[in-house]
Amino acid sequence: MKNLVILISGRGSNMMAIAEACAAEGWNARIAAVISNKPDAAGLADAAQRGIATAVVDHRAHADRAAFDAALADAIDAFEPDLVVLAGFMRILSVEFVNRYAGRMLNIHPSLLPAFTGLHTHRRAIDAGCKLAGTTVHVVTPELDHGPIVAQAAVPVLEGDTEETLAARVTAAEHILYPRVVRWWVEGKLDFAGAGRIAHRSGAAQWLV
Ligand code: GRF
């Protein structure tokens, strides 16, 4: 049984999609905890309602990034995670923190990486006239939004889209993609051997349109 620890900062809809798939599909895994850097993150209540342990490590209560990251690592490690899943966790993490979970920390970023790292991805995709947007699940490495890509989902950018309408379309795709990828990880389906290129051992499509 693999222990998953999910980090959130807000709504937590990806976290809930993973928790629901884990339960519904009977993964050999449990959501050991949901941890937020924000005490008022809406997803905390949803997780608690599902009977999942929750914790808050408030970044504002720590003097600097190093102190916050150390406290966060302590909170995570208390749940003995096999995998750390970042799901809308809006903090930049130190190299030390990232290295501590090297190869066992995933993130979802709402763009087709390597396009649009950082913030405001939907606005930037619309402004650039993109016809496709999407989302990427990647392994976390020290450089922000740059780790090896595990899977991507593409959605159309439609005439008249606003940031909100495009975000909603991307988020719906994330709720399919992220649980799928976490399940692959739990089942040992991902092959990390290929120098930064992650393959699925049975050749499952690592993309979704
Ligand atoms: C998602 O779009 C994710 O890609 C980004 O932040 C959003 C989080 O949404 N990192 P939620 O908190 O999972 O609902």
Image (cartoon, rainbow, N blue to C red):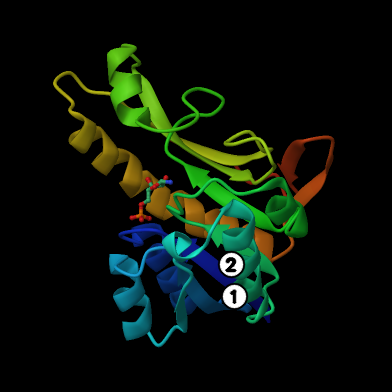
**For the residues bearing labels 1 and 2, Cβ distance under 8 angstroms:** yes
Residue under numbered circle 2: 72
Q: Position of residue 139 (x, y in %)?
A: 66, 46
Lateral position of residue 191 relative to residue 91, left or right: right
The residue furthest left is 160
| Residue type, label 2 | Leu
In the rendered image, the vertical position of residue 105 relative to residue 157, given as above or below: below
Q: Quadrant of the N terminus?
A: bottom right
Lateral position of residue 61 relative to residue 147, left or right: left
The tally of labels here is 2
Residue under numbered circle 1: 75
Q: Position of residue 82 (x, y in %)?
A: 70, 70
In this rendered view, identify the residue nearer to me: 194 or 60. 60
| Quadrant in the rendering for residue 114 | top right
Crowd tier of the residue under label 1, counting other residues whose Cα lies within 10 Å: few below 14, some 14–19, many 20 or above: some
In the rendered image, the vertical position of residue 128 relative to residue 199, given as above or below: above
In the rendered image, the vertical position of residue 19 relative to residue 209, given as above or below: below
In this rendered view, identify the residue nearer to me: 9 or 107. 9
| Residue type, label 1 | Ala
Q: CA distance from mark 1 to mark 2?
A: 5 Å
Q: Secondary structure at mark 2?
A: helix
In the picture, the disc for residue 5 is none
**Residue 161 visible, this orientation:** yes
Q: Position of residue 117 (x, y in %)?
A: 50, 29
**Residue 206 visible, this orientation:** no
Identity of the residue drawn at 44% across and 32% down:
111
Identity of the residue drawn at 34% across and 12% down:
128
Crowd tier of the residue under label 2, counting other residues whose Cα lies within 10 Å: few below 14, some 14–19, many 20 or above: many
